[in-house]
Image (spheres, rainbow, N blue to C red):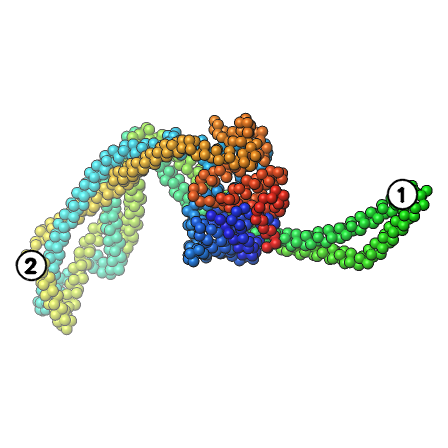
C-alpha cells in the first residue's frame, strides 16, 4: 500500500494543504511540530475515523475554530489499484459524516456508512495493527527521566519480541489466565462456581423445609375448604327455610286481604268494639297522649337491640379468639411474655419510622438526580467557556506570533545594514593605518613613499566617497526604521486587543463557574441531608436490632410464639375496644329511654322499661291496624278503591305462591309450627355466622403463617437456574483452561518460531544501520541481549539512549515486517530517530533508502536538515517543503 496524494481542506488549523508523495523515500518538512503531528494524524483519521483505541474521540481536537466540518481526501494505491478516499466529519453529529471510496483504476465509486472504517473495510486490518506496522515512531510508554530509561526500554523490547505488543507481557498474561482458575480468588471463575454450588446445597436444604411447610399449608387449606363448603351448605338450607317463612307471610297477607275486602256493617261494628276496648286500655297507660315520646323511646330501643347483637357477636369473636390464643400462647413466665409483646410493639413502631425515613431518602435522591442534570449542563457550559477561552488564546498567540515574525524580520534587516556599514568603514580605516605604517617604514625610499602616498590618497578618496554614498542611502535606512517602529506599534495594539478579548472570555468562564459552584453547593447540601437521614436510618436500624435482640433474649424463657399469636392478640385488643364502645352506647341509650318514658311512667331500672315497651308495642301495632281498618270501612268511596286494590294484590300474591310451589297447594302452618320454623332459621343464621367467622379466622391464619414461607416451585426453579449457571460457569472455566493450554502452545510457537525470526531480522537491520557496531539481538533468560561484531555481550545499561532508540526502531521494523503478511505498509516516521549526528543520520538514511525499494517511506520534520545530509551523501530522496504550500 502506498500513499499518492494528500488533500487537507480543513483539519484543525490546517487549511487547503495539497501535496503529492513519491513511491519510495519521501522527506516532508517545513511545518511546525503541531502541524506535522496533525498531518500524520490526518492519515489515520481518514482510514479509521476520530475514535482512538481508548474510546477517546479526537474529533474535538481537530475541529476548525470557525465551527465548520473536518474535510479532506487522499489518493493511495492498494493491490495495483488506485483509490480516492473522501471524508467529511460533521461538526455537530456523527450521523451526518460522509465517506466516499472510489476505485480510480476501475472507475467505480462506493458510499460507505458513517460508522464504517475504510481501513478495516479495504485492508481487513484494525487501527491498532495499521498504526503498529506503519507508524514506527518513539514509544509513548518510555519514562520521562533518564534513570529508568534503559530498564523500561529493555522491558518494552522484551514484550515486543515475545508478544508483538509493548504493553502485553507474557508473565502478566499467564498470571491473569491462571487467576481465573484460582478457587481462592474472589474474582475468579472457579470461586464463582464454588459459590454457586454452595448456594445450591443451601437451597436444597431449604427445599426440604419448604416441602414440609407446603404439606402443613395444604392441610390448613383443606380445613378452610371444609369450612367454606359447610358454610355454603348451611346457607342453602337457610335459604329454603326463609322461602318457607316468606310463603307463610304471603298466606297471612292473603287472608288479611280477604278479610279486609268484606265491607259489611257487622265487620265495622266488630272492629269498632275492639278498637274502643283497646283505646280504653291505652288511655290508662297515657301512651296515646305521649305518643311522640314513646316512639322516640321505641327507636332508641331498636338501636339497643342492634347494639346488643353487635356486642354478642364481638363477645363471641373474643371467646373464639381467646381459645385460639390459648392454643398458640407459648409456655413460660408471664412477665417475659408481656415483655415480648411490648418489644414486638416497639419493633413495629421502629420499622414504621425506618420506612418513613426511607421515603424521605428517596425524595432527596430524586432531588439530587434532578440537580445532577443541571450540574452536568453547568459543567458543560464551563467546559465550553474554557474551550472558547483556549481558542481565543491560541488565536491571539497566532496573531502575535505573526506580527512578532514581521517585527523580527524588520529588526534583522536594520541590524544587518548597520553591521555592514560598520564593517566596511572599519576595513577602510585599518587599510589606511597599514598604509601609513608602511610609509613611515619606507620613508627613505622615495619611490616607495610616492607609491604609498598614492595608495593613501586613493584610500582616503574611497572613504570619503563611501561616506557620501551612505548619506544618500540614509533615506532608505530611515524608511526601514519607520517600518520597524510601525510594526512595534502594531504589536502593542494587537496585544491590547487580545488582552481585552481575553478579559471577556475569562469573565464568561467565571460566570459559568459561579453557576456551577452554586448548583454544586445545593448538591452538597442535599448530600449532607441524605447523610443525616442515612445516619438516622442507621441509628433506627441499630435500635431495631437491639429490640429484636432483647425480644429474642426474653423469648428464651418461653417457647417461641407462633407468628399467628401476635395477630390474634392484636385482634382481641381491637375487639375489646369495640365491646367497650358498644357497652357505652347501650348505657347511654338506656338512660335516654328512661328519660323519654318519664311522661308516661316512672321506671326504677331499664328492665321494667324494656318489659313495658315490648308489651306496649304489641298493643300499639293492634291499635294502628284497627285504626286503618275503621278508616277504610267508614269511607265507602275509599273502601271501594282499597277493595279493588286488595283484589289486585291478592291475585299477585296467589300467582307468586303458585310460581314458588309449582302449583301445589300450600297449607298454612300453625303458630307453633311457624315459631319452630322461625327458631330453626335463627339457629341456622347464628351457626352460619359462627362458621363464617371461623373461616375468616382460618384464612387469616393461613395468610399470616405461610405468607413468608418459601415456595417449593420457586425454590426448585432457583435450584435449576443455579445449576444452569453453574454448568455455564464450568463451561467458561473449561474454556479458560483450554485457552491456557492454547496460550502455552502459542507461546512455545512464539519462542520457537516468531522470536527467532524477529531476533534474526532485528539483528540484520541493526547491523546494517550501525555498520556492524551492534551485530545481533537475542533473548536470553527472558532478557534482551545485544552483541557487538565480536559477539561480545553489551550490557543494556551501558547503551546510550540513542543506541537504545536504534535497537527499538530495528525491533519495531522487524516485527512490522513479519506480522504484516502480504501487505506492504508504508513506513511513516517523524524525525525523532534522526536527531543525532550527521554521520548517524547518513547511516539511517542509507538504510531507509534501501528499505524504500520495497516499502514506501515518509519522514516528517520541521526543518530541512535531513535534505542537506542527503545531498552531501548523494542519497536521492523526494523532499517537499510543505511550508510553501500552506
Query: Where 347 falls versus 306 (above or below)?
Result: above
In the displayed image of the protein, which residue is found farthest to the bottom? 637
Q: Could you say where residue 662 lies in the image, as x and y percent from the top left?
A: 6, 59
Disc 1 element: helix
Q: Is residue 860 visible?
A: no
Q: Residue at x 68, y 52 (%)?
A: 405
Expressed as whole percent of the image width and height from the top left, the position of residue 488 reads 72, 55
Q: Nearer the viewer, residue 689 or 710?
A: 710
Q: Is residue 720 visible?
A: yes
**In x, y percent, where is residue 634?**
14, 70
Which residue is pictured at 38% across the width and 38% down the height? 346
Q: Residue at x 90, y 48 (%)?
A: 451
**Relative to 246, is 320 above or below?**
above
Quick one: which residue is furthest to the front in this view?
Answer: 447
Q: Which mark is residue 662?
A: 2
Residue 494, given in percent of the width and then of the height, sits at 68, 56
- Is 216 placed left or right of 71 in the picture? left
Left or right, 487 with reference to 672:
right
405 vs 331, nearest the viewer: 405
How many discs mark residues in the rendered view? Answer: 2
Tell me which residue sits at (29%, 38%) in the image: 724
Left/right placement of residue 695 relative to residue 722 reads: left
Amino acid at each position: 500500500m502506498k500513499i499518492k496524494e494528500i488533500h487537507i481542506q480543513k483539519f484543525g488549523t490546517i487549511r487547503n494543504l495539497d501535496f503529492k508523495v513519491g513511491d519510495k523515500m519521501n522527506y516532508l518538512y517545513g511545518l511546525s511540530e503541531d502541524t506535522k503531528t496533525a498531518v500524520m494524524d490526518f492519515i489515520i483519521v481518514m482510514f479509521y475515523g476520530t475514535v482512538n483505541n481508548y474510546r477517546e474521540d479526537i474529533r474535538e481536537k481537530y475541529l476548525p475554530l470557525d465551527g465548520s466540518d473536518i474535510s479532506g481526501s487522499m489518493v493511495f494505491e492498494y493491490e495495483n489499484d488506485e483509490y480516492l478516499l473522501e471524508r467529511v466529519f460533521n461538526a455537530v453529529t456523527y450521523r451526518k459524516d460522509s465517506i466516499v471510496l472510489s476505485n480510480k483504476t476501475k472507475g467505480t465509486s462506493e458510499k460507505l456508512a458513517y460508522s464504517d472504517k475504510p481501513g478495516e473495510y479495504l485492508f481487513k486490518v484494525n487501527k491498532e495493527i495499521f498504526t503498529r506496522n506503519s507508524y514506527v515512531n518513539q514509544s509513548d510508554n518510555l519514562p520521562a527521566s533518564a534513570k529508568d530509561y534503559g530498564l523500561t526500554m529493555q522491558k518494552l523490547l522484551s514484550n515486543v519480541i515475545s508478544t508483538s505488543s509493548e504493553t502485553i507481557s507474557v508473565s502478566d498474561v499467564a498470571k491473569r489466565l491462571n487467576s481465573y482458575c484460582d478457587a481462592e480468588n474472589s474474582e475468579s471463575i472457579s470461586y464463582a462456581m464454588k459459590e454457586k454450588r454452595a448456594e445450591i446445597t443451601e437451597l436444597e436444604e431449604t427445599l426440604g423445609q419448604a416441602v414440609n411447610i407446603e404439606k402443613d399449608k395444604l392441610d390448613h387449606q383443606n380445613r378452610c375448604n371444609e369450612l367454606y363448603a359447610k358454610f355454603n351448605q348451611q346457607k342453602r338450607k337457610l335459604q329454603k327455610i326463609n322461602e318457607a317463612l316468606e310463603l307463610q307471610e304471603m298466606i297471612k297477607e292473603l287472608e288479611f286481604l280477604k278479610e279486609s275486602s268484606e265491607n259489611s256493617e257487622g265487620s265495622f261494628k266488630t272492629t269498632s268494639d275492639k278498637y274502643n276496648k283497646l283505646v280504653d286500655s291505652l288511655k290508662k297507660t297515657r301512651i296515646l297522649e305521649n305518643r311522640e315520646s314513646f316512639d322516640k323511646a321505641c327507636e332508641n330501643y331498636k338501636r339497643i337491640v342492634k347494639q346488643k347483637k353487635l356486642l354478642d357477636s364481638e363477645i363471641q369473636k373474643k371467646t373464639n379468639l381467646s381459645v385460639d390464643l390459648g392454643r398458640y400462647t407459648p409456655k413460660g413466665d408471664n412477665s417475659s411474655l408481656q415483655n415480648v409483646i411490648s418489644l414486638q410493639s416497639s419493633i413495629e413502631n421502629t420499622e414504621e419510622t425506618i420506612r418513613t425515613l426511607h421515603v424521605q431518602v428517596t425524595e432527596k435522591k430524586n432531588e439530587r438526580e434532578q440537580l445532577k442534570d443541571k450540574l452536568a449542563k453547568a459543567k458543560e457550559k464551563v467546559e465550553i467557556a474554557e474551550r472558547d477561552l483556549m481558542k481565543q488564546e491560541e488565536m491571539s498567540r497566532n496573531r502575535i506570533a505573526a506580527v512578532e515574525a514581521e517585527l523580527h524580520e524588520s529588526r534583522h534587516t536594520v541590524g544587518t545594514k548597520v553591521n555592514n556599514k560598520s564593517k566596511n568603514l572599519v576595513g577602510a580605516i585599518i587599510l589606511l593605518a597599514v598604509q601609513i605604517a608602511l610609509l613611515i617604514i619606507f620613508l627613505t625610499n622615495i619611490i616607495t613613499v610616492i607609491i604609498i602616498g598614492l595608495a593613501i590618497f586613493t584610500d582616503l578618496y574611497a572613504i570619503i566617497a563611501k561616506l557620501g554614498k551612505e548619506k544618500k542611502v540614509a533615506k532608505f535606512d530611515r524608511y526601514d526604521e519607520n517600518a520597524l517602529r510601525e510594526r512595534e506599534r502594531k504589536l502593542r495594539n494587537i496585544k491590547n486587543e487580545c488582552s481585552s478579548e481575553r478579559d471577556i472570555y475569562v469573565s464568561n468562564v467565571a460566570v459559568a463557574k459561579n453557576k456551577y459552584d452554586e448548583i454544586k453547593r445545593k448538591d452538597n447540601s442535599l448530600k449532607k441531608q441524605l447523610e443525616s437521614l442515612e445516619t438516622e436510618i442507621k441509628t433506627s436500624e441499630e435500635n431495631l436490632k437491639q429490640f429484636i435482640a432483647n425480644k429474642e433474649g426474653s423469648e428464651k424463657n418461653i417457647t417461641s410464639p407462633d407468628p399467628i399469636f401476635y395477630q390474634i392478640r392484636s385482634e382481641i385488643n381491637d375487639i375489646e375496644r369495640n365491646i367497650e364502645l358498644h357497652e357505652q352506647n347501650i348505657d347511654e341509650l338506656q338512660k335516654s329511654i328512661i328519660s323519654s318514658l318519664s311522661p308516661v311512667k316512672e321506671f326504677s331500672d331499664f328492665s321494667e322499661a324494656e318489659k313495658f315497651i315490648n308489651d306496649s308495642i304489641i298493643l300499639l301495632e293492634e291499635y294502628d291496624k284497627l285504626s286503618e281498618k275503621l278508616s277504610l270501612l267508614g269511607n265507602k268511596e275509599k273502601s271501594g278503591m282499597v277493595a279493588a286494590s286488595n283484589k289486585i294484590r291478592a291475585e299477585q300474591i296467589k300467582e307468586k305462591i303458585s310460581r314458588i310451589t309449582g302449583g301445589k297447594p300450600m297449607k298454612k302452618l300453625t303458630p307453633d309450627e311457624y315459631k319452630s320454623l322461625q327458631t330453626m332459621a335463627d339457629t341456622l343464621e347464628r351457626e352460619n355466622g359462627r362458621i363464617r367467622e371461623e373461616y375468616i379466622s382460618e384464612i387469616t391464619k393461613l395468610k399470616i403463617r405461610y405468607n413468608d414461607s418459601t415456595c417449593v416451585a420457586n425454590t426448585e426453579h432457583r435450584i435449576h437456574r443455579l445449576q444452569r449457571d453453574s454448568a455455564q460457569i464450568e463451561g467458561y472455566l473449561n474454556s479458560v483452561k483450554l485457552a491456557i493450554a492454547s496460550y502455552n502452545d502459542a507461546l512455545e510457537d512464539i519462542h520457537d518460531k516468531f522470536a527467532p525470526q524477529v531476533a534474526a531480522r532485528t539483528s540484520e537491520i541493526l547491523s546494517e544501520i550501525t555498520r556492524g557496531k551492534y551485530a545481533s539481538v537475542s533473548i536470553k533468560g527472558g532478557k534482551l541481549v545485544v552483541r557487538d561484531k565480536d559477539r561480545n555481550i553489551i550490557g543494556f545499561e551501558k547503551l546510550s539512549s540513542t543506541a537504545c532508540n536504534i535497537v527499538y526502531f530495528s525491533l519495531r521494523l522487524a516485527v512490522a515486517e513479519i506480522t504484516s503478511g502480504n501487505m506492504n505498509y508504508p513506513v511513516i516516521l517523524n524525525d525523532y530517530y534522526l536527531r543525532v549526528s550527521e554521520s548517524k543520520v547518513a547511516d539511517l538514511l542509507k538504510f531507509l533508502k534501501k528499505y524504500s525499494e520495497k516499502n514506501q517511506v515518509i519522514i516528517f520534520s520541521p526543518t530541512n536538515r535531513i535534505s542537506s545530509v542527503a545531498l552531501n551523501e548523494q542519497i536521492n530522496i523526494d523532499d517537499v517543503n510543505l511550508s510553501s504550500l500552506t
